[in-house]
Amino acid sequence: MKRSEIKRRPMADTVLATLEPEDKEYRELDGNGLYLRVRPDGSKSWQLRYKKPDGKWSWLGLGGYGKGDHQLTGAQARQKAAELQADAAEGKNPLATKRARKAAEIEAANNTFEHLAREWYATKCKTWTEGTALRTIGALELHVFPVFGKRPYVSILPMEWMEFLRAMEQKGIIEQARRVRRYCVEVYDLARVTGRAQYNPLEGLHKFLLTKPSENYAYVTMDELPALLRAIRAYGTTDVRIGLQLLTMLACRPSEIREARWSELDLDVGLWTIPAERMKRRREHLVPLPSQAVELLRNLHNLTGTYPLLFPGRSDTTKPRSNTVFLMALRRLGYEGRQTGHGFRHIASTILNEHGFDENHIEAQLSHVKEGVAGIYNKAQYLEQRRTMMQWYADHLDTLAAGNVVEFKRA
């Protein structure tokens, strides 16, 4: 609308939004010294006309008009103008008080738990896999930030954290509550060691929270394993079935298989090279492929070989299948809470140890690496021994699935 059509002041939101620009910039009075400045390009901003302590009149910009982080609606501009006019009436310089308030707002924003948590996340995520980083920030955004995100972190009491974590437990997400508590402990540790907090309000809370055995790595008993192997081999979706079979025989983490790329595989040699950036310990990992795995991968290549990923997503082939794809398949097979993708690593470790294979070979296959100097070793260490061991293991699983296994211990 044209400014000549304005009938009431303060101006309504509909007037502010539809006020048309003119050939030259103009200011339109909203009331009590507050003006809306309209430029020829249509941009709008708020200005306050005030009297300085020396008696001279001056203009003070308050911010752009609109709804956003750095914009003001009519109501917000009027409130800010009233605060500055009150300062002027007390003999203060509104320009100085505006800057002081802005600095206080910035300081308050930087002292919120969310700001501190995101600072902690930025320092830690560089050493995590993409999956770990997404799960961590996702848990904070879903559970913590809606409750404590905008609060100054030094004002949140231990009892508040206790009530919050117990509320998560009452929802049945005890394991998630445990992880969230661990994240938040580290967030406060960052504040403490950088001199921004005197103590950690979550310290010691774990003593008064529920605990239960982790189900993340659930696995079936050895007596139940043959039936599970047969159920997997009968699973209907081809790529998921192959993924589950690879999980059973390679002792890799589910994310390592789910995010695998064809460029990492040499099927002629029977070797899978997982790059360091996809490994938990950020070290390149070599996985010898038994003949059964090579055959499965060649079959999978007929399905997904035109894509970079072994298991491309259905809606976006540039991304891997969901991180729950194998877990959901096991659930459909009736193994919810009894078997997870990660649990196959435990099964492999148990069987290989029970049959007398060298512990160093098993740990190398699981990519369990000691810290420090002891962990710096040739990436190909034990490769040939592991190749023999994993071929035996794949053959053993075939025998178990066939149901005619005769148990024995290796010397």
Image (cartoon, grey):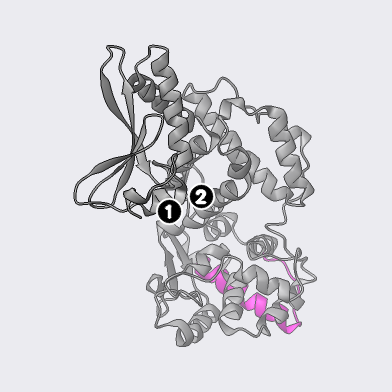
Mark earlier in primary sequence (2, 1): 1
Quadrant for the N terminus in the image: bottom left
Q: Nearer the viewer, residue 63 or 390?
A: 63
Give the x, y percent position of residue 246: 57, 74
Name the quarter where the C terminus is drawn: bottom right
* Mark 2, secondary structure of its residue: loop
1 or 128, nearer to the observer: 1
Q: Is residue 98 left or right of residue 109?
A: left
The residue beneath circle 2 is 369
Amino acid tagged 2: Val
Residue located at (50% from left, 83% from top): 300
Residue named by callout 1: 283
333 inside magenta stretch: no
Q: Quadrant of residue 253?
A: bottom right
> Which residue is depicted at the point 39% across and 25% down?
103
Find numbered disc 1 in the image and state the secondary structure of the residue it sits on: loop
Give coordinates of residue 88: x percent, y percent.
Answer: 38, 17
Nearest the eye: 368 or 231: 231
x and y percentages locating residue 58 in the rendered image:
27, 24
Q: Are marks 2 and 1 in contact (CB under 8 Å)?
A: yes
Q: Quick check: can you spot residue 204? A: no
Q: Decide: is 76 above or below 83.
A: below
Residue at left offset 55%, top offset 49%: 136
Alpha carbon distance from label 2 to label 1: 9 Å
Residue depicted at 60% across the width and 22% down the height: 199
What range of the chain is rendered magenta? 386-411
